[in-house]
Image (cartoon, rainbow, N blue to C red):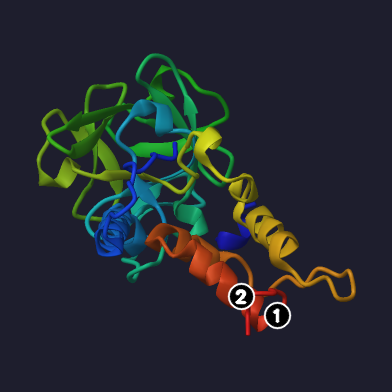
Amino acid sequence: MTDEYAAVKRGKLHLKGDKPKAKKRKHKKTEKSEVSKVDEDAVKHGSWWKVTKIEDITGSISIEFGNNSYVSALDNGLFTIGAPHGDCEGPSPEEIFTAFPAGENKFALKSGYGKYLGVTKDGIVIGRSDAVGPMEQWEPVWEDGKTAILSSLNKFMSVNEEESVVAQSSKVGDQELCCIRSNKTKEVNKSVVPTEEQGDLAEVEVNYVKKFQKFQDKKLRINESGISELKKAKVEGNLHETLLDRRSKMKADRYCK
């Protein structure tokens, strides 16, 4: 089935005579603050973070019901709930959909089979349409940190006892609660991002190699182990340390011993 899926904040002015120890305590406090910003939930889901606003329902999207289990497309146009994934593991290809805006506070989803998700009059979620009509439009509902997805028939998406994906309830209970997840890079203000870190992770690594490489033979030495390690490091907040370690292994940094 898978094969078918194609501002830097300025510090306080330090006057002559200030104790260095006070500066050190401030530095540690800053580091602690940065660590607290790590999205632990995203780490546990393979860097797929919870969407909380309609503007972020674009591109690659997965819908999670329960704990690390996602709506999965079948080749007959129906949908089921996939097997639970382990920690730090994201959704499988058949559990990833492409989202598009579809009017005010609404979106459409296309499965990996190239069909749009809709709903039948009986409340069965299907993916057999080549275009987006009223039945292929969905509306996210957020309240008190919880998420539900409303169909065009004003019924909420859920998974029934047969593990089929349906939209048959007009009320939200535990079965209708879900998480809409995205793995796209969150938008940041590039004016406060160093030049070396503007671009995707592969480009970032090349930028830092160019900045620190010894250039003995004028050839770039890039770690070939892929960028999955960098994705995890970025989420956990230790990207710079990981980049340095990768350069050290390639003996491509003048600061590496």
Residue 217 image offset from top left, x and y in percent: 90, 75
Q: Quadrant of residue 245?
A: bottom right
Q: Please, what is the three-letter code of the amino acid marked with disc 1? A: Met
Pointer 2 residue: 246
Q: Quadrant of residue 252?
A: bottom right
Mark 2, secondary structure of its residue: helix
Residue highlighted by disc 1 = 250
Q: Mark 1 and mark 2: span between their CA atoms?
A: 7 Å
Specify the label residue 135 is tagged with.
none
Q: Is residue 37 left or right of residue 171?
A: right
114 vs 95, left or right, is right
Identify the residue at the far front of this view.
17
Judged from this view, the residue extending furthest toward the bottom is: 257
The answer to whether the residue labelled 1 contacts the one labelled 2, judged by CB atoms less than 8 Å apart, is yes
- Say which residue appears at 41% left-offset and 17% top-offset: 134
Question: Relative to residue 87, is residue 121 depicted above or below?
Answer: above
**Residue 82 can be seen in this image:** no
* Quarter of the C terminus within the rendering: bottom right
Q: Residue at x 18, y 41 (%)?
A: 176
Return the x and y of residue 140 as percentages of the image width and height: 29, 29
The secondary element bearing badge 1 is classed as loop
Q: Nearer the viewer, residue 135 or 8?
A: 8
Q: Tell me: residue 6, above or below residue 171.
A: below
Q: Residue at x 70, y 80 (%)?
A: 250
Mark 1: few/some/many CA within 10 Å (<14, 14-19, 20+) = some
Quarter of the image for the N terminus: give it.
Answer: bottom right
Relative to 238, residue 254 above or below: below
Q: Is residue 93 left or right of residue 151?
A: right
